[in-house]
Image (cartoon, coloured by chain):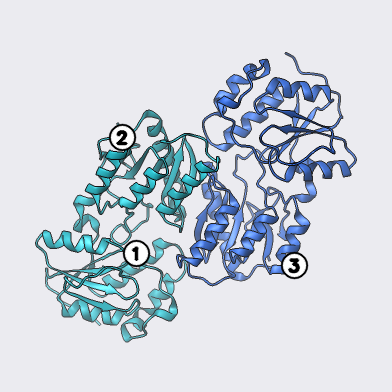
Chain colours: A blue, B cyan
Amino acid sequence: MGRPDLGTSGPLAIIAGAGELPRIAAEHVLRSGRPVFVVLVEGEATGDYADFPHAVVRIGAAGRLKEILLENGCREVFMTGAFRRPRFSEIDWDMGTVRALSSIMRLRFGGDDKVVNGVVHIFESEGFRIVGPREVLPGLIAEAGVLGRVKPSRRARADIASGLTAVRGMGPLDIGQAVVVLSRRIIAVEAAEGTDAMIRRCADLRASGRVAFPPPSGVLVKAAKPAQELRLDMPVVGVDTVRSAIDAGLEGIALEAGAVLMPQRREALELADEAGLFIVGVGRNDGPAAQ
Amino acid sequence: MGRPDLGTSGPLAIIAGAGELPRIAAEHVLRSGRPVFVVLVEGEATGDYADFPHAVVRIGAAGRLKEILLENGCREVFMTGAFRRPRFSEIDWDMGTVRALSSIMRLRFGGDDKVVNGVVHIFESEGFRIVGPREVLPGLIAEAGVLGRVKPSRRARADIASGLTAVRGMGPLDIGQAVVVLSRRIIAVEAAEGTDAMIRRCADLRASGRVAFPPPSGVLVKAAKPAQELRLDMPVVGVDTVRSAIDAGLEGIALEAGAVLMPQRREALELADEAGLFIVGVGRNDGPAAQ
């Protein structure tokens, strides 16, 4: 099957997983004047999208998804929200899926990076273009510098530097790319549990006496992995993460500039300002741009 | 103050922190025919050592500790059990402590490795010799090969290899050196929370659907950091860790041969055998010796 000729514009297809992100993205794109078409992935998408043009597909139903995109004139695809890894038993074995089978087989094992890079490959081999938050939501991505009103202390700047060293060092290992640093010691590393669970763990470490510094202290450092496909899998810091950081008594949050999405950016910064928590964007290669 | 002349033998001083390890070590050493003298660190040691010759010192009371060791003819020191990092407010400012102050100041910041290397330096500069589990408890250290009756599957051997790659890669970063690997993906990384808490998190990840493979699956890989001072800070795998691994539905445990202490080795292996969990020792440089 050749590449479909889809023209140069058309609605942006938003393939929606769990959480608030697909709705935030859909509203943001609509406000910018471009139509959207939301594809709800069954069992994944959690919001109500009745007020948007939409369709529902089962996860893994690659043939049906392609039909829907073509029928609605969508050439560009923005995949957002949280997705579990599909189990084989959940895959809908239509013809498109069978065609994608060899790719899916490759995805089944290995780290997250391999999975998301494989998804990009499948879409692009079918003539669609995957677009990412940098194109769709540029105003919601952390930039370099102090983002809120609170500036990091000298101690916090040292913690940021330690955290960046750690996430850079772990980068090639395809583990999570968030850590919490307290007085230059890495006290928590994120893997499959997610950032918020990791931050809550830091509150427990403090309560149990495993870490001894009184709050506010400690910095969440979150970056992308070097090989991370930012179009499909950009790290996210939402209001919940900011609230978790405040509850855990952290001093602030450092995000890799250009590589971390803040979907509720305004609310997140207001919450941080009120609590005296800093949020800074730091360059991966430049060290902390956090003066 | 010069080095005290302590002769070439005398009781082994066991400086006891929290947990079962100091008692296990004291009994083990006594059975081997050498006398012991237990120094209970106040607020840290948790067991009852009334049946051993012993004394109590406050944490940070370096001068008093030195006196006790000299009075009891102890030249060799084995420090074991869990210690919190001392807070400044807990330090007993006797003359020995004041002398050690510059060293303590250096210890106050930085990763665990710096702290323990500093403790070695303080003891050795005072003429004592720090001995480690390799000398005191050689029979309780994981060796290469299958340690129990259960052998790792082919899938588990691939997970062990992935875990070793990760812990080697993280080594220079002075983070924890235990990970859980499931189908070649690192699903949990240990930092300050400790190995057992990390394993329990894996059970939660499974319960919440964040990892999808049915139990038994997943391997705990635990190694030492390259710079780790194994005399003072050898990684430990106890019966509790084995039980946590069984409860979390893991397939097995891989330990760095020669670098991980199993204080209740016999009980741990029996428990693993009964549950069908493998425990293997693997060479840091040789890849998994786990056939």
Q: Tag on residue B186? A: none
Q: Indicate whether B252 appears above or below A239.
A: above
Q: Which residue is drawn at 70% across and 32% down?
A: A41
Question: Residue at 57% across / 60% down in the picture?
Answer: A161
Query: Looking at the image, which is closer to me, B218 or B225?
Result: B218
The x, y position of residue B194, in whole percent, is 42, 56
Residue under label 3, please give it: A149
**Which numbered disc, 1 or 2, marks the residue that appears first in the sequence?**
1
Quadrant containing the C terminus of chain A in the rendered view: bottom right
Residue carrying label 2: B290
User: Horizontally, is A77 left or right of B265 in the view?
Assistant: right
Identified by mark 1, the residue type is Ala
Q: Which mark is residue B82?
A: 1
Give the vertical position of B147 relative to A217 (above or below): above
Mark 3 lies on a secondary structure that is: loop
Q: Which residue is drawn at 88% across and 37% down?
A: A34
Q: How far apart are marks 1 and 2 (CA)?
A: 30 Å
Numbered disc 1: what chain?
Answer: B
